[in-house]
Image: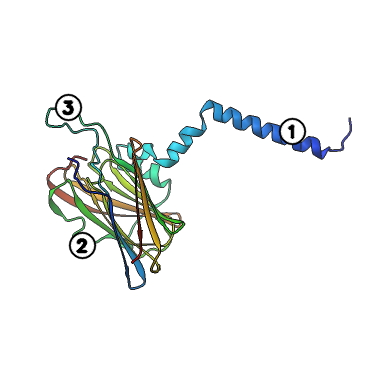
Amino acid sequence: MVMAIEDRMRVKLKSGDTHIRILLAHPMNNGQGVDALGEPIPQEFIQDIRCWRNDDEVLAIKCGTATSTNPYFSFQLAGGEQGDKIAVRWVDNTGAKGEVEILVP
Amino acid sequence: MTDTINPQRRALLRKAFSASTLALVAGSGLILPQRLLAHWPSDAFTAEAVEDAILAIMGQAEIATTKTLKFTTGKPPKKTVSGDSVAVQIDSELDNIERIAILVENNPYPLVMSLDLISAVKLPFKTRIKIAKDSSVIAVARADGVLYKTERFVSVVIGGDA
């Protein structure tokens, strides 16, 4: 089931670090399942996620099919200040792409 | 035959050779698979044994089981009802971690995800994974050429569609 949500990201400055939470909207089908009519659901899952702070790439996540539906990630970046631009870009195995950008409040 | 080197002739030869080699490689389609491999390491993600997956994603290195890499208590839980979305949290006191891999031993393909910590990233790292049936959840980190490993056994009532 594809939920009617968008890719979301929350960023917060806390004790000098930038806390980042990411929730991507993606079904993450592994190619094994069948739909209500018994038709196989084709494989569709996010493979590559890149996180950027301003112009620096900080984290690259490679996913397999066992990452949960609507993948969630949370991590911290050392330092950071108001107005930093945090960007996340992902691409899945079918070539679909997504991007979220946010300024540190 | 003279032994003197003509620099102009040298430069011309070098240019001609590099251009022709590049054209040849591009024409044969050799560049594309390499780029795809770098984009997503399919051999690691389709390995069916934990050891193969770790070798493919982390490379050959000594594995140390230590307490410097650990799961946060309760993440993953020892027992969970749904294997579709299991929270996992990894923490470590190690510096210079280059890469972390999360694996589920009894999934069809054990490797769940790999993280490249390029710069400034601080743990703990939280995510959610699918677990197909009762299994060990394993985290492996590579720091300074050594692999650090930790694992926890998770019982699943309803398996996830991993």
Residue drawn at the location 40% of the way across and 47% of the way down = B58
Query: Do pointers 3 and 1 mark residues of a single chain?
Result: no
Q: Chain of mark 1?
A: B
Query: Do pointers 2 and 1 mark residues of a single chain?
Result: yes
> How many other residues sit within 10 Å of disc 1, few (<14), some (14-19) or many (≥20)?
few
Q: Amino acid at mark 3?
A: Glu
> How many other residues sit within 10 Å of disc 3, few (<14), some (14-19) or many (≥20)?
few
The residue pinned by badge 1 equals: B13
Colouring mode (rainbow / by chain / secondary structure / one colour): rainbow
Determine the residue located farthest toward the right in the rendered image: B2
Determine the residue located farthest toward the bottom in the rendered image: A15
Q: Is residue B156 left or right of residue B103?
A: left
Where does residue A22 sit, x and y in percent of width and height?
Answer: 29, 55
- Nearer the observer, B81 or B24: B24
Q: Nearer the viewer, mark 3 or mark 1?
A: 3
Q: Chain of mark 2?
A: B
Where does residue B8 sit, x and y in percent of width and height?
Answer: 80, 38
